[in-house]
Image (tube, coloured by chain):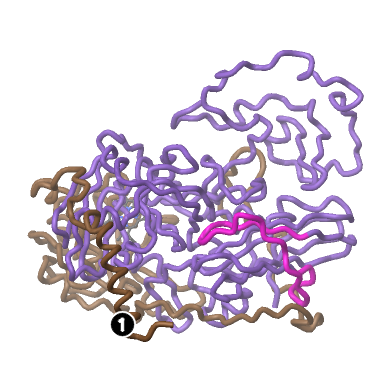
């Protein structure tokens, strides 16, 4: 077999060989298809604001007061005047301290880790029936209002590209960003894996009346 | 009938009383009791048990369709299923979401027979409804920390070297309604947010090399052209490994519901990162922490902490026959059938238990067994007519073993919504009916 020097030499040679055939393809612009993005095109589509540090937030600002007006006009029909959520539309406020409960209530206030994410999401997706129709100032105002509904910022708070990244969200420290799975470690047993006497049905869907029909036309079943 | 405004299929359904009594010996009884019963949805499978009805079109009679000439070619220039299959459709759970625009529909797994999902039955998850995009005007912008920001048309994208790969897409909320307890008595609603197709497009790495990746790049933002501009952050390494930017699904252009004209395909990872109607890719040095990776698609643990960036679909399997929608038709020999998959590679083994997990037998895997794709398995079973508890358990190529729901709950409680890949238990009653249950 090869010693380590020979092995690294071989590796270099094979990399060179690969480079010989693929170098052109790896070169930017090798295919030359498409057109270079213009500054105007980039300005129109480069809409993201980064959640943790707010990079990408535009100029502009908005107050809690202004936000309450825009909210009443454009958002309250679904989310409720104070963010309490109409029907099954999401609650935007409340739920503080419920995350360990049997029925947790994750909201902007109780769950979201970053404030600039709120600006980014309203700007990219709301109001649901007419997205991308709000000015940057109005989005800042709505962000201020929703944070204020959650008692995260005071009444006189003004949201802008500098103030939002500094807002500390209550649930900020509860997130981990590396996946700990696999976390179950089940074993592949094939026979006598359990005592048959321990096999008990703990819950059944029988008779629960939650299942829409799976034949004929679509079901319109509503909650009981 | 082609196009977006297809009338509901049952509207065209003829009276099918001449098919009454049709039986499919292996899959139990497919009841075609006629339009009235189908419309009210009131018939139960097996309701006609024991009523051998006259079958005027079966032997010795010559069937009416044998005594006339059929419709000619291009009668249906774009083919569609037989009218009697009108009930095989994607379905939703109306009480689950506020409206249908940010919602899900489920594939009818109980009526599917292989590892490829027909395009019209592929499950749906939209965040702002299905946009109808004009491919002539659609553009993909690639920019950020790159040498050469580009705007590509569909024509440009289709000129790049193409690849075709078979992969599943699963929503991480598949089975999410079962974290607390067995709730929905249905294969379709408990497992139907998985589908699998052959995808054709260009490697994402080809596009990223074309724009030139600056050396500080670690993360990639991907964004859709839908009303929600749905967006996620992906590590560069995954983008360069096996991600595809695809324009075709099972040989034809993507369906609008699947992102026409262009979507991302991130093999083995939760479905929402495979951004549909893909319009923008931005290279950066840090993740974006968008709403869809903070407020949603994070897993809430019992201690109140949350796991973010849990993209992987762990190995999972489910028995698709029998199931609540397809009960057994009396004691005798059956073929247990099911599907298995893993986001970590190939399925290595599937075991089946008929006694609630006390004893297991290995099922036969059917070719092709592909990485990050649905794999079909079968096992012959002679049912003695007594109560049984059917389960399947997959082991993937990494040796990972599919857990039970109680093993999952021990680790994650029952509030985490996503990534329920637990073993499904089907309870078989002596009359052959099947129920979704959870065991201790």
| Quadrant including the C terminus of chain B | bottom right
User: Residue at position x 19%, y 74% from top?
Assistant: A153
The 10 Å Cα crowd at callout 1, few under 14, some 14 to 19, many 20 or more, is few
Q: Is residue A201 visible?
A: yes
**Residue A112 screen position, x and y as percent:** 31, 71
- Label 1: state its secondary structure: helix
Q: Residue at x 63, y 40 (%)?
A: B88
Residue at screen point 52% across, 40% down: B120
Q: Of residues A103 and B56, which is closer to you in this image? A: B56
Q: What colour denotes chain B?
A: purple
- Residue A86: quarter of image: bottom left
Q: Position of residue B267 (x, y in %)?
A: 44, 59
Residue tagged by mark 1?
A173
Chain painted in brown in the figure: A
Residue B307, x across and y down, in percent: 40, 76
Q: In the visual, does B190 lie left or right of B168?
A: right
Front residue of B413/B84: it is B84
A61 or B426: nearer the viewer: B426
Tell me where residue B283 sits by quadrant.
bottom left
Asked if residue A224 shows in the view, the reply is no
Q: Which residues are magenta?
A: B353-379
Locate residue B329, reporting x and y percent. Answer: 84, 50
Please identify the dominant SS of the magenta region: loop
């Amino acid at each position: 077999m090869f010693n380590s020097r020979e092995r690294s030499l071989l590796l270099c040679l094979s990399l060179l060989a690969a480079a010989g055939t693929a170098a052109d393809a790896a070169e930017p612009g090798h295919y030359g298809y498409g057109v270079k993005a213009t500054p105007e095109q980039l300005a129109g589509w480069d809409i993201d604001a980064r959640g943790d540090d707010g990079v990408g937030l535009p100029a502009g600002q908005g107050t809690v007061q202004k936000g309450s007006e825009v909210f009443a006009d454009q958002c309250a029909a679904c989310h409720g005047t104070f963010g309490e959520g109409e029907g099954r539309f999401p609650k935007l406020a409340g739920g503080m301290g419920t995350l360990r409960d049997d029925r947790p209530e994750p909201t902007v206030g109780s769950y979201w880790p970053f404030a600039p994410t709120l600006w980014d999401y309203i700007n990219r997706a709301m109001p649901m029936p007419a997205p991308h129709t709000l000015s940057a100032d109005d989005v800042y105002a709505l962000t201020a209002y929703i944070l204020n509904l959650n008692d995260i910022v005071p009444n006189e708070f003004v949201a802008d590209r500098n103030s939002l990244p500094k807002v500390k969200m209550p649930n900020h420290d509860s997130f981990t960003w590396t996946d700990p799975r696999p976390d179950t470690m089940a074993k592949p047993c094939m026979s006598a894996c359990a005592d048959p006497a321990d096999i008990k049905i703990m819950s059944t869907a029988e008779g629960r009346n939650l299942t829409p029909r799976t034949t004929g036309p679509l079901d319109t079943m509503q909650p009981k | 009938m082609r196009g977006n405004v297809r009338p509901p299929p049952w509207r065209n359904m003829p009276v099918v009383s001449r098919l009454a009594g049709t039986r499919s010996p292996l899959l139990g009884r497919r009841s075609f009791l006629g339009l009235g019963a189908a419309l009210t949805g009131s018939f139960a499978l097996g309701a006609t048990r024991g009523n051998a009805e006259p079958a005027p079109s079966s032997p010795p009679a010559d069937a009416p369709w044998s005594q006339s000439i059929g419709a000619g070619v291009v009668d249906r220039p774009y083919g569609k299923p037989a009218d009697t299959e009108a009930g095989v459709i994607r379905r939703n759970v109306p009480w689950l979401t506020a409206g249908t625009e940010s919602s899900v529909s489920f594939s009818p797994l109980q009526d599917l027979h292989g590892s490829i999902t027909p395009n019209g039955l592929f499950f749906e998850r939209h965040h702002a409804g299905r946009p109808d995009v004009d491919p002539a005007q659609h553009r993909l912008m690639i920019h950020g920390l790159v040498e050469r920001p580009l705007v590509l048309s569909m024509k440009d994208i289709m000129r790049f070297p193409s690849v075709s790969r078979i992969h599943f897409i699963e929503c991480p909320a598949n089975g999410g309604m079962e974290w607390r307890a067995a709730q929905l008595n249905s294969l379709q609603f408990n497992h139907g947010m998985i589908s699998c197709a052959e995808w054709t497009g260009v490697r994402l790495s080809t596009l990223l090399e074309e724009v030139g990746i600056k050396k500080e790049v670690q993360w990639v933002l991907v964004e859709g052209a839908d009303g929600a501009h749905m967006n996620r952050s992906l590590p560069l390494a995954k983008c360069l490994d096996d991600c595809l930017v695809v324009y075709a699904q099972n040989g034809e252009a993507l369906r609008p519901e699947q992102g026409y004209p262009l979507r991302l395909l991130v093999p083995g990872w939760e479905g929402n990162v495979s951004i549909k109607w893909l319009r923008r890719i931005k290279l950066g040095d840090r993740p974006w922490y968008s709403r869809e990776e903070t407020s949603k698609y994070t897993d809430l643990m019992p201690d109140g902490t949350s796991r973010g960036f849990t993209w992987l679909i762990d190995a999972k399997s489910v028995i698709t026959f029998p199931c609540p929608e397809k009960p057994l038709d009396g004691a005798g020999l059956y073929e247990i059938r099911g599907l298995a998959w893993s986001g970590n590679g190939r399925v290595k083994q599937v075991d089946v238990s008929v006694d609630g997990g006390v004893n297991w037998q290995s099922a036969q895997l059917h070719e092709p067994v592909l990485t990050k794709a649905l794999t079909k398995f079968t096992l012959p079973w002679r049912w003695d007519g007594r109560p049984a508890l059917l389960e399947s358990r997959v082991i993937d190529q990494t040796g990972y073993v599919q857990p039970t729901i109680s093993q999952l709950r021990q680790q994650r409680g029952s509030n985490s919504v996503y990534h329920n890949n637990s073993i499904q238990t089907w309870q078989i009653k002596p009359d052959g009916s099947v129920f979704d249950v959870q065991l201790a």
